[in-house]
Amino acid sequence: MRMLNLNAIYALLLREAKIYFREKERIISILISPLLFLFVMGKGMASGRSPAPGYTYQQFIFPGIVAMVMLFTSITYGLYIIWDKRLDFLKEVLAAPISRATLFVGKALGGMLGTIIETLLLLIIGALFILPLGPVKILLCMAAAFPISYMITNIGLSIGAAMKSMEGFGLVMNFLTWPLFFFSGALFDMGAAAPYIKVISLFDPVTYSVDLLRIIMLDKGTFPVWADLGAIAVFCLITTIIGVISFGRLQQEK
Amino acid sequence: MAAIKTDELVKRYTEVTAVNGVSLEIPEGEVFGLLGPNGAGKTTLISILATLVKPTSGTALVAGHDINLRPLEVRRNIGIVFQEPSVDDLLTARENLFLHSMLYGMPRREIDPKIDKMLALVNLSDRADSFVKTFSGGMRRRLEIARGLIHGPRILFLDEPTLGLDPASRKSVWEHIRELKEAHRTTIILTTHYMEEADSLADRIGIINKGKIIELDTPSALKNKVGQDLVFLKGEINVEALKALPFVNSVEPENGHYKIGITNSGANLQALLNSGGRISEVEVRRVTLDDVFLKFAGQQIGTDAEEHAESIFERIAANKTIRK
């Protein structure tokens, strides 16, 4: 445990939590586009056939939209470390007597916190207006949110640590976040998708997240549960390693 | 025991050598001023000592720990106030200090009383729970100094602590630094390019230029190297006669007049004017560190440029030999 300083992790997490709750606009604004997808696109295409028998299209895409919130919140949070660089908060933390692994875990937990709150908000909205969900299903979804948000926050943090300015933000959103979302099968049935989409989707961590959430909420998935959980575990491990390495490279910019 | 002992520290970037063989020894309790123009290598040197930047070669003992081998131990024993502001705008003053205390591993029950004490020290008690984004530049600086000290470091690094502050805030920061020195015996390493600042705060001053320490002494000794007073004379000046006087340290032409460094102007000015020739204008003032800096760094810049030119020719020659 010499590598990880628990007091420091607690302090970093506390800082992230305080800032998160102080920026209420961010909490609301991050839910806007998923709600548009859900209520405008989901409702607009309601005339189309749903890939899941017994569910409307809007209900079918709800797990995918939950995954979308996890994806967007976590990646955005991770990229926000560029702001930390500019706010000079990072300078203070990089000079502190804590290991980079401690700093990384503190930031990753901070990202998970935000994502889990957003997920809970969306699940409540969904349970009220779209897809009736019992407390057990909501709890299972929340449990799934932990590893999913962790692995995606890691991706965001790794990229953010390497980025020099906020200008790259739009680039990452267009070339990474949206493709991760569209190839995940959040909006369609993977079983009926074109072969090239299927192949690409296998490398997309969001695919397994969507599938896991669909199994929990609709009892219908493309892969078995253990495959989803296994894939997510592997992604968690890989992204942790990459993240700690990229944090180790974070140098004091003079 | 020395608070800091460096041994041939070098930091090379692809384009420049920011620190070029610095060997220093700073005893405990000293206020050491590192004086130099922008880009002289002050911040890089401090960053190396604070283990934020790894040196290309050489090493240093800071608070008894090797910067290359035990950086976390070094960090626990030092405080640092950065050149640019580094307090978290989105937190209150108290929250900033709490985060810092936790990161530096202070025992939980000691943190709250210590925060109150430090805020009182820098006169921010009444603003303890205000967000830092509402603070003025001087208040931020004071909060940063409080933060740099809260974990009881043996050595405090202050990188341009008054840069960009108005004169009133600057004076108040200076007073806090003086208090620290007297009340806590903290070793303080201070970089600045304000001569006045180094002069009024530092026990010893190292003048740094192009990554090298070119002079190191007490402020008064440095000033004595130029002379205690400067006399500016205009007119038809008899330079040789002036140079022959025992109390004259230097005679230099400067913008149409002569700058003469002398000791004890009160007793010697009359004699100087008598043998100076036909004088049309006289001005006398005390030597400042500005003058010292100009004398040492100014010379050094000249010789350095020549060395540099030489090395370029050498490099071209070397390249040509390799191609052959």
Image (cartoon, coloured by chain):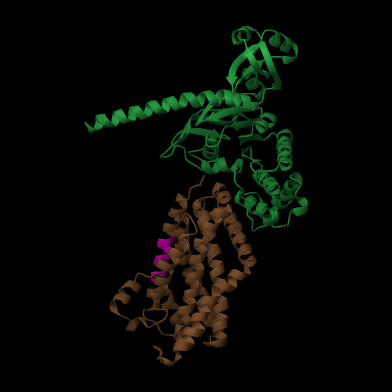
Chain colours: A brown, B green
Part of the protein shown in magenta: A229-239
* Main SS category, magenta section: helix
The percent coordinates of residue A189 (x first, y second) are 37, 83
On the question of residue B149 being in view, the answer is: yes
The percent coordinates of residue B245 (x first, y second) are 64, 7
Q: Residue furthest left?
A: B324
Q: Is residue B197 magenta?
A: no
The percent coordinates of residue B291 (x first, y second) are 62, 25
Q: Residue furthest right?
A: B126
Dividing the picture into quadrants, the one containing residue A200 is: bottom left
Judged left or right of residue B32, residue A2 is left
The percent coordinates of residue A44 (x first, y second) are 47, 88
On the question of residue B1 being in view, the answer is: no
In front here: B189 or B312? Answer: B312
Answer above or below: position of B60 versus B117.
above
Judged left or right of residue B11, residue B235 is right
In front here: B18 or B75? Answer: B18
Q: Quadrant of the C terminus of chain B?
A: top left
Dividing the picture into quadrants, the one containing residue A27 is: bottom right
Answer above or below: position of B108 versus B203.
below
Q: Residue at x 54, y 63 (%)?
A: A109
Q: Residue at x 50, y 47 (%)?
A: A253
